Image (cartoon, rainbow, N blue to C red):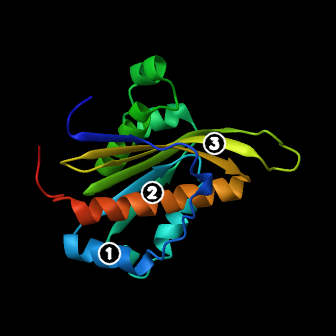
Amino acid sequence: MDENILFQNVLDETSVKLKPKLDFSLMKLFEEKKQTIAVVETITDGRLTTNFKKISGSLIFFKGSLVCHNVKNLIKLLGLLSATIKNKGWYSPEIATEMAKGAKKLFNTDIGVAVTGNLKYNDPILNKNNEALIYISMVTNKKTIIKHYKFFGTMSKIQNNIIEAVFIVLKYMLLNQNLKEEY
């Protein structure tokens, strides 16, 4: 993998309490860094977009989103490579990164974020004890960050954990990187 890609495998985050108050701090960071963002989400069903839109002043930095579950549409709209899907699989860090790059390009932003994953319903009747393998990718001109998580619980709990993980990684990215420099 390219040295500009940070890949961190973080499995079984169910014991971590992800409850940061990030709304105000994210807004301030986007203002300070003069950054814009777009997202593509599959497994969060638009809830990531909703959480961004709840941040006061998000119109300044949040430029758009795409919620899509159809592979053919993602290939068409984001330019995903069907060869990558065939060789790496639909749920992979490579696809998450292609999705994030596609979001960045589609909405002409500084940061592209993608969230994808595979949900396994262990108890579909009661909707509990589900298991989700998640890939989160964030792309700038300078850096690509990929995170891999495994969450358990109801679909709602899994989605909340994903959203909170995205906000934490995004805050880290904004605090620790000079995002305007190119490779």
Task: Kindly state the secondary structure of the residue where label 2 is placed.
Answer: strand
Real-space CA distance between mark 3 and mark 1, rounded to the nearest whole angstrom: 32 Å
Q: Which of marks 2 and 3 is nearer the N terminus?
A: 2
* Numbered tag placed on residue 132 in the rendering: 3
Q: Can I make out residue 78 in this image?
A: no
Drawn side of residue 154 relative to residue 74, left or right: right
Q: Earlier in the sequence, mark 2 or mark 1?
A: 1
Q: 30 or 22: nearer the eye?
A: 22
Q: Going 48% across and 77% down the picture, which residue do you hit?
A: 21
Which residue reaches farthest right? Answer: 125
User: What's under tag 2, amino acid-wise?
Assistant: Ser
Q: 24 or 83: nearer the eye?
A: 24
Q: How crowded is mark 2: few (under 14 residues within 10 Å), some or many (20 or more)?
A: many
Q: Residues within 10 Å of mark 3 (few under 14, many from 20)?
A: many
Real-space CA distance between mark 2 and mark 3, rounded to the nearest whole angstrom: 22 Å
> Circle 2 sits on which residue?
65
Q: Going 50% across and 76% down the picture, which residue do you hit?
A: 54
> Circle 1 sits on which residue?
60
Quadrant showing the N terminus:
top left
Question: Which percent across, then down, holds residue 95?
Answer: 43, 33
Q: In front: mark 3 or mark 1?
A: 3
